[in-house]
Amino acid sequence: MTDEKFGRYPGGGTGMGSDVTAADMAACMSRGYEVQQLAARVDLCLGRVEKVLGGFREIQLLDWQSPAGRAYRNSVALQEVALGRARVRLEDALASVKRHAQSVGTSAGNPAGRY
C-alpha cells in the first residue's frame, strides 16, 4: 500500500530500489567495457610505437659513410630515445587503465561500490 500523496511505501521506500541497483550495475558494466576498449586502444598504440622503434633501430644499423648519413643516423637515434620515453609512458598508462577497468568491473558486482 502506498501513500498516495508521496508515492511511497510504508517504511519510506519508493519501491524502485532493486531497479535502480540493476540500472547502476548495468551502467557500471558498460563503463567497465568502455575502459577495457580504451585499454585495447592504448595497447594498439603501444604496438605501433614498438614497430616504429624497430624501424629506427634498423636505420641505425645501416652503414652510413657520408657526414650527412651519419647526421641522419644521429637524428634518428635522438628520435628513438624520445619515442622510447613515450613508450614507457604508454606502458604506465596501459597498466593504469587496466587497473581502472578491473576496479570498475569489481564495483559492478558490488551494489555498494559506485563508479
Image (spheres, grey):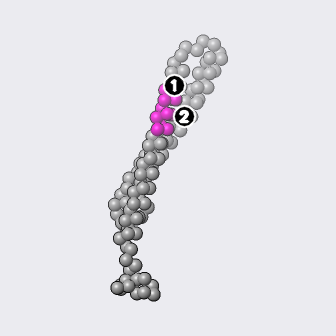
Whichever of labels 2 and 1 marks the residue nearer the N terminus, that label is 1
How many marks overall? 2
| Residue that numbered label 1 is attached to | 55
> Which secondary structure, mark 2?
helix
- Can residue 65 be seen? yes
Mark 1 packing: few (<14 Cα in 10 Å), some, or many (20+)? few
Mark 2 packing: few (<14 Cα in 10 Å), some, or many (20+)? some
Residue drawn at x 52%, y 29% as measured from the top left: 52
Q: Nearer the viewer, residue 89 or 101?
A: 101
Task: Give the overall secondary structure of the magenta segment.
Answer: helix
Residue 91 is one of the magenta-drawn residues? no
Q: Please identify the quarter of the rendering in which residue 64 is found.
A: top right
Q: Nearer the viewer, residue 3 or 64?
A: 3
Q: In which quarter of the image is the C terminus?
A: bottom left
State the extent of the magenta-drawn residues as a range: 44-55
Q: In the visual, does 25 lie left or right of 77?
A: left
Residue 87 numbered mark, or none:
none
Q: Which of 28 and 15 is in front in this view?
A: 15
Measure the alpha-carbon separation of dots 2 and 1. 12 Å
Residue drawn at x 53%, y 38% as measured from the top left: 86
Q: Please identify the quarter of the rendering in which residue 30 is found.
A: bottom left
Amino acid bearing label 2: Leu
Residue 19: x and y in percent read: 38, 69
- Can residue 96 be seen? no
Residue 54 is one of the magenta-drawn residues? yes
Residue drawn at x 56%, y 34% as measured from the top left: 82
Q: Which of 79 and 19 is in front in this view?
A: 19
Residue drawn at x 55%, y 32% as measured from the top left: 81
Q: Quadrant of the N terminus?
A: bottom left
> Which secondary structure, mark 1?
helix
Residue 97: x and y in percent read: 45, 49
Residue 83 numbered mark, or none:
2
